[in-house]
Image: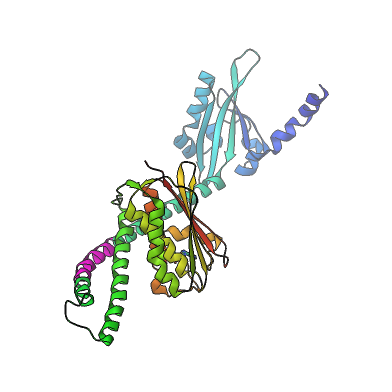
Amino acid sequence: MKGIESVRAYQEDIIESIPSTIIVLDGGLKILYANRNYYVKSGKKERDVIGERLDRVFSQMLIEKTRIDEKIRQVFETSVPFNGGQLRYPGGLFFFYKIHPLKEADMSIRKVVLLMEDITELTRLEEELRDSYVKLENAYAELKEEDEAKSDFISTASHELRTPLTVINSYLEMFEEGLLGELSGNQDEKIAIIRTQTDHMIKLVEDMLDTLRLESRKFKIQRVSLKLDEIARSAVDEVSRLADLKEHTMSLKINGDLPRIWGDRQRIKQVFGNLLTNAIKYTPNAGKINVELKNENGHLLVSIADTGIGIKEEEQEKIFEKFYTVSGKSLTSESERMGHGLTIARGNVEAHARSIWDKSSLNRGSTFYFTLPKGE
Ligand SMILES: Nc1ncnc2c1ncn2[C@@H]1O[C@H](COP(=O)(O)OP(=O)(O)OP(=O)(O)O)[C@@H](O)[C@H]1O
Ligand SMILES: [Mg+2]
């Protein structure tokens, strides 16, 4: 009891000092009471407020715009509180208001409380946020348009390059097979250089087309039942010359008898190829590259670990993005870093409804993992 009494003692102080406006009105819309906050906000004097009708205290324009007088009358008539509207004062002040009926002992309503909360700052922040959002949306639309234009350009250019490359490649093959006559040692050497460069160009064009296909969802895989260890062996075999050039030691560990998988041979080989060439490229000479295949619950797990330059934690997810390459010092020239390999690898693995991820620490090597579904 004592507690309640003491609360009553400072009830008035509370009402007077809270940072909200409280106004009590009677049925004739006369103001019976206003707390200190109202006088501070409005700059009015008590003698010009108490006993006056609302429409003589609030500005005419404000009343006409908000119809607050009608809302108060409605609360008197229905006894239902009015739960929210906004008052906008000239000069940019914003208030949120509520009207609450005050029930007398006999349950009649002879007074209502008008509660007003200054939301100027909140509204300003909200407007700022809305502005930023619109700006962001516009910037995104612009970027998207630019990105689409770029993709269109790359797609057209890649398709255009394919035909001349096929012609160059077939004549090159004729030279290599001796169909155009015996070549001197010097010519052989030059043809070998043209071969390396042509292969590089063909790979680039195919990678660009694959990356764009992935985006446009034109990417299709054809699944059959496969032996993953066979694919892994041939993929390791194919890059072994490249690994030898850098004196890397490569190993392939197959844990136990692996069940067959259900997937697209070419695409899975491409995943191995892209991850293995990365491991070779981004590892200083005489490094170690270990490939491991494991049978796990529901899938087969492949890991490809290297002892290379590693990847900073903040880049470990980004490297899978389209055209993303890690900037700064690297073991390779910029022209060898196109940022296609991992995007395609991820697209391939995800087309098999599986995932690919990496774990790495800078200067301590990287391990890339991917899973593939078991098949019959
Ligand atoms: N094993 C790795 N060790 C360290 N960094 C790596 C490794 N694999 C990838 N990276 C980093 O991730 C980036 C993206 O790799 P990604 O294979 O997508 O493209 P790329 O190797 O630059 O070019 P390409 O299109 O020829 O594959 C690389 O540029 C490299 O910085
Ligand atoms: Mg790569």
Give the image quarter of residue 333.
bottom left
Compared with 22, 271 (above or below) is below
What is the residue that sits farthest to the front in this orientation? 257
Compared with 170, 320 (above or below) is above
Q: Is residue 98 left or right of residue 263?
A: right
Q: Nearer the viewer, residue 49 or 33?
A: 33
Q: Is residue 199 left or right of residue 291?
A: left
Residue 289 showing in the rendered view: yes
> Looking at the image, which residue is at 16% across and 79% down?
180
Q: Is residue 242 magenta?
A: no
> Looking at the image, which residue is at 50% across and 31% down?
68
Q: Main secondary structure of the magenta part?
A: helix
Q: Position of residue 224 (x, y in %)?
A: 31, 46
- Quadrant showing the N terminus: top right
Q: Position of residue 214 (x, y in %)?
A: 33, 54
Q: Which residues are magenta?
A: 152-167
Compared with 41, 101 (above or below) is above
How many marks do you count on the picture?
0
Q: Nearer the viewer, residue 209 or 238?
A: 238
Q: Position of residue 44 (x, y in %)?
A: 62, 41
Q: Is residue 268 left or right of residue 299?
A: left
What is the residue that sits farthest to the top in this orientation? 106
Give the image quarter of residue 110.
top right
- Quadrant showing the C terminus: top left
> Looking at the image, which residue is at 33% across and 50% down?
264
Quadrant field for ligand 2: bottom left
